[in-house]
Amino acid sequence: MAAPLFNAKLTVHTQSHDYPIAIVEQCDMATSIAPYINGQQVLIVTNDTVAPLYLQQLQEQLADSFTVAVCILPDGEQYKNQDSINQIYDALMAQHFNRDVTLVALGGGVIGDMTGFAAASFMRGVDFIQIPTTLLSQVDSSVGGKTGINHAQGKNMIGAFWQPKMVLADMSTLKTLPARELSAGLAEVIKYALIMDIEFLEWLETNLPAMMQLDLAVLGAAVKRCCEYKAAVVAQDEREAGMRALLNFGHTFGHVIETHEGYGSWLHGEAVAAGMVQAAQLSQMMGWLGEADVARIKRVLILANLPIDPPPINVDTALELMGHDKKVKGGQIRLILLKSIGQAVLTDDFDTQLLNDVLS
Amino acid sequence: MAAPLFNAKLTVHTQSHDYPIAIVEQCDMATSIAPYINGQQVLIVTNDTVAPLYLQQLQEQLADSFTVAVCILPDGEQYKNQDSINQIYDALMAQHFNRDVTLVALGGGVIGDMTGFAAASFMRGVDFIQIPTTLLSQVDSSVGGKTGINHAQGKNMIGAFWQPKMVLADMSTLKTLPARELSAGLAEVIKYALIMDIEFLEWLETNLPAMMQLDLAVLGAAVKRCCEYKAAVVAQDEREAGMRALLNFGHTFGHVIETHEGYGSWLHGEAVAAGMVQAAQLSQMMGWLGEADVARIKRVLILANLPIDPPPINVDTALELMGHDKKVKGGQIRLILLKSIGQAVLTDDFDTQLLNDVLS
């Protein structure tokens, strides 16, 4: 007898409404999301990589019950911009869709962020549903309602907080995910362990090999754990007034890498991995982490096939790019550092010379 | 001894926060808004018509206490688009402004709507303050948090609900307003009377001549009354799930005129005036208004120098344009009609043939 498929559900509590995250080993997407579609109009937004894999079946099945249109965008972080959002608007207008419409994001974090922002801004806000098809979006970007696009001078500068009606994480979609993308997702998984839970780090040190070999039940368990962490944080601090910022561990350094190298060159998760090492090194200089802690962090990232060194970037350029970060307050760069493994803090109380040392 | 200047304050209650509307006959703008600026960064957004009149003084005085930048956009509804929003983003990024920034909208409804949407979407939401300098924006668009831009195929299709930190209506700015723009604003003033308060209509029939002659105290009293109506509606139905839609009386017909004639050709208030007559005519065909009621509506609009007839538009084209309206639900056009003067209803229960008759 086959083992039952992994199947979990949790609820995210937000100011606007509560919504479910379903994490399933394998499912029929249309059947799973249909109960969360109000009205008769559906626009599926996806990209040219994901479309050939999952679009036809989803579209055909939804078409039995709804008026379904499709917007296929080019794949990649470099297309996370206003032009793509305009394509979504144009598709909605061409169909005469209105406030009744539900947008369905079928793809990774880029598709989810853009679809969410289009949903937040079309007719001042319509429904959307997330079907994340990458590990990174399953554990991170599909949960919590951060939507948006990049500005030429900064990542995620334009956007809105806008919560989906439901999130469907179908683990079987990870079978078609390139290994490099899987690793990029593992960077965010490891991030949760580093900022919140040293026991989860131990679990990952044991289970990462199975995850890399696409054991969907183990992956499902990890995704569920990450979504639980994130849902707990979002429920307390939806608009990132405080503790939600801790989820950006490694991201301030990582955004510098992404912006400097050009969107799409380094994957977001890869930049976060190298950025977490930089944040850990600064935490060590502050006397909070030991050498062994930093070595352990590097080891687990290497186990997930992730980079631990940033590309060469001039220190002044890096500081300039950091100046655009959304966490900057009163002109002062604020960073998320580790007091210890499993305990992160947001602080502007660090020696600028130490930051320079880490960046150089 | 001179009579004391008109000076009133009211509070708008919304889900996110309460905020004041100050309606004053004349004031020092910088002093009035400074207490509502959190942080050190200010971006004033204005247009090339208003800038020569009020920008320099406001900018210089604010610069004593804040880091102030300016974004001057071309004047006109035809520039209420994504390009203008991008100019605001670019100005914010060029200054390295961040979540601490306050955007100040200095101008009419177009500037207010665009500045509000830029504030709603920059870094997923920053503060903004409205200084409406047209009668239309003082009585309508600056109150209630509707922000947005036009899409080539429809007015206000892209936007957000985003509430300002305060609204400052300085009646003396109306002295520099072209007479045609003053009349356009009066269309929205008359709208409140028609949908909510027949006694206010009587007051207007008496006082419109003084308002047309720029009696600022009488204008201030009218603005205060309109803001009170609107604040009461917004407090009950911020996101237009129900009664807030009534404020769009004349707007579904009016949007058809604006879209068909090209943004900037008919002023919004002019289109609303002609649209209110069409809605009144349909209300008469429904047996709700008498012939004398429609004649009275036309008379008060003429008194305010407003058009009462739409331009020639093909019926099918008009219906096609109406199909894009945000109030369309389940494919059915919904209209705001008058049960009587002072009492509006949102309904889809009208004979399509009657709508055709009105449009032709």
Image: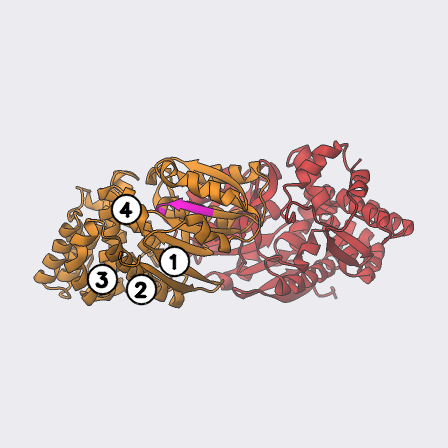
Chain colours: A red, B orange
Q: Position of residue B29 (x, y in %)?
A: 41, 49
Disc 4 chain ID:
B
Q: Residues within 10 Å of mark 3 (few under 14, many from 20)?
A: many
Q: Are marks 3 and 1 in contact (CB under 8 Å)?
A: no
Q: Position of residue A71 (x, y in %)?
A: 48, 43
Q: Which residue is mark 3?
A: B193
**Magenta stretch?**
B104-109
Q: Earlier in the sequence, mark 4 or mark 1?
A: 1
Q: Are marks 2 and 4 in contact (CB under 8 Å)?
A: no
Q: Which residue is mark 1?
A: B22
Q: Which residue is mark 2?
A: B229
Do discs 4 and 1 share a chain? yes
Q: Are marks 4 and 1 in contact (CB under 8 Å)?
A: no
Q: Which residue is mark 4?
A: B268
Number of numbered discs visible in the structure rendering = 4
Residue at 15%, 66% in the rendered image: B288
Q: Is residue A151 visible?
A: yes
Q: Amino acid at mark 1?
A: Ala
Do discs 2 and 1 share a chain? yes
| Marks 4, 3: nearer the viewer | 3
Front in this rendered view, residue B175 or B312: B175
Q: CA distance from mark 4 to mark 3?
A: 18 Å
Q: Main secondary structure of the magenta part?
A: strand
Residue A28 location, quadrant:
bottom right
Q: CA distance from mark 3 to mark 2?
A: 10 Å
- Tell which residue pokes out farthest to the front in this image: B1
| Marks 3, 1: nearer the viewer | 1
Q: Residues within 10 Å of mark 4 (few under 14, many from 20)?
A: many
User: Position of A353 compared to B338: left or right?
Assistant: right
Secondary element at tag 1? strand
Secondary element at tag 3? helix
Q: Earlier in the sequence, mark 4 or mark 3?
A: 3
